[in-house]
Image: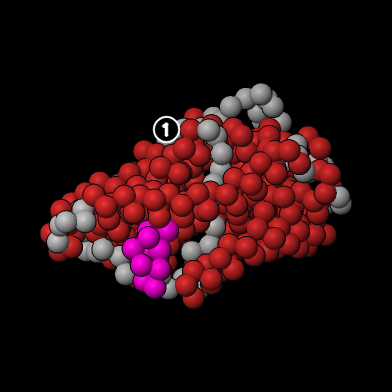
């Protein structure tokens, strides 16, 4: 088998594996609130989220098409398809490491950082990166959780004012049913943004290896397989991370869960519609913290929040360094 074909095939396989891992790694963020309040049983919530993830992933391609040109020019790289493969392998390794310890790190940061790290290692200089596009992506990744926190704080402050004369128990009872709907929409929003990142990377590899024209969009088979892989991964469920998101940030009630879901899904869907990749993990977790702060800042476990922030900060550079190491070791053997 021709080496280019083999490497491209491996990219598709590893890319789908990344989406599968992303599914059970990140789906916790979409359903943790409704599981922690017992609005849905864990298995039911996860299966619902898997279906909604698939529908979201199959609905959009704008983020994927932006990624194919905004990180790096595949034609500027020697063995561009090999670079993409090393980046994917590094991102998979990082996601598995953070899943083992139950820490909701950003799959988006891991993937984008890994592709950038492998590209720089291959070229030997940073100018290989598309600075304008790469900077836009990084700014979106940094600002989106801040916006999520602010929206969460604002929405729950509005809820507190609207339901100020109602008993808490009655309000929670009313919001428990609504929480099922917001959790479903949350999972849909997750699919619209997260699955597209791998679609973009696979498309990047197909362009670099000459199987697609530079102006070509995301092939439907790539879109379908990425959506299916994430949905199947979602159905497995990331119970370790569900525990962290659902219980260790703050004590979530139906009313606070609905506020957090509405906040995060609105930010994620807005990003999808304007073709910006954001970290769904960061947006969801920061929205929960924003809601908790609006409710009572002492309700938020800031120690968990600090640990999450540290993980978010180190993910992109760590994934980049890991990808550079994977590339150098692999290139010494295969190139």
Relative vertical location of residue 155 with respect to residue 58 in this rendering, above or below: below
Q: Residue at x 37, y 60 (%)?
A: 294
Specify whether 267 is left or right of 185.
right
Residue reaching furthest to the bottom: 303
Residue at disc 1, secondary structure = loop
Question: x, y percentage for residue 49?
Answer: 33, 50
Q: Residue at x 44, y 39 (%)?
A: 269
Relative vertical location of residue 285 with respect to residue 192 in this rendering, above or below: below
Q: Residue at x 50, y 39 (%)?
A: 271
Question: x, y percentage for residue 85?
Answer: 67, 50
Q: Residue at x 36, y 38 (%)?
A: 55
User: Of 42 and 288, which appears nearest the observer?
Assistant: 288
**Residue pointed to by mark 1:** 59
> Is residue 73 visible in the rendered structure shown here?
yes
Relative vertical location of residue 99 with respect to residue 187 in this rendering, above or below: below
Q: How is the image coloured?
A: secondary structure
Residue reaching furthest to the right: 124
Query: Where does the magenta region start and end?
Result: 290-299
User: Of 152 and 10, which appears nearest the observer?
Assistant: 152
> Is residue 235 visible in the rendered structure shown here?
no
Question: x, y percentage for residue 285?
Answer: 44, 59
**Can residue 228 be found in the magenta stretch?**
no
Relative vertical location of residue 256 with respect to residue 201 in this rendering, above or below: below
Specify whether 31 is left or right of 201.
left
Number of numbered markers:
1
């Amino acid at each position: 088998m021709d080496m280019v074909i083999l490497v491209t095939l491996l990219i598709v396989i590893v890319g789908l594996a990344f989406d599968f891992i992303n599914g059970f790694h990140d789906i916790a963020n979409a359903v943790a609130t409704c599981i922690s309040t017992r609005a849905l049983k864990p298995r039911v919530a996860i299966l619902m989220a898997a279906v909604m993830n698939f529908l979201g992933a199959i609905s959009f391609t704008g983020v994927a098409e932006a990624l194919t040109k905004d990180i790096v020019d595949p034609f500027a790289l020697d063995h561009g398809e090999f670079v993409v493969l090393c980046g994917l392998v590094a991102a998979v390794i990082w996601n598995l490491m953070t899943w083992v310890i139950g820490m909701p790190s950003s799959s988006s940061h891991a993937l984008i950082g890994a592709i950038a790290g492998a590209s720089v290692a291959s070229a030997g200089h940073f100018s290989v990166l598309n600075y304008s596009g790469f900077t836009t992506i990084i700014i979106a990744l940094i600002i989106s959780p801040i916006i999520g926190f602010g929206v969460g704080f604002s929405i729950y402050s509005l809820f507190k004012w609207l339901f100020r004369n109602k008993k808490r128990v009655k309000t929670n009872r009313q919001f428990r049913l609504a929480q099922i709907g917001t959790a479903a929409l949350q999972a849909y929003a997750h699919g619209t943004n997260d699955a597209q990142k791998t679609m973009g990377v696979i498309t990047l590899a197909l362009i670099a290896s000459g199987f697609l024209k530079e102006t070509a969009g995301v092939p439907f088979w790539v879109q379908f397989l990425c959506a299916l892989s994430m949905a199947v991964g979602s159905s497995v469920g990331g119970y370790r991370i569900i525990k962290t998101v659902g219980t260790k940030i703050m004590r979530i009630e139906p009313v606070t869960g609905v506020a957090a879901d509405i906040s995060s899904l609105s930010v994620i869907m807005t990003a999808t519609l304007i073709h910006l990749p954001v970290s769904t993990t960061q947006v969801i977790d920061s929205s929960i913290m924003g809601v908790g702060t609006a409710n009572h800042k002492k309700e938020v476990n800031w120690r968990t929040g600090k640990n999450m922030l540290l993980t978010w900060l180190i993910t992109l550079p760590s994934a980049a360094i890991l990808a550079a190491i994977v590339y150098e070791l692999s290139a010494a053997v295969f190139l």
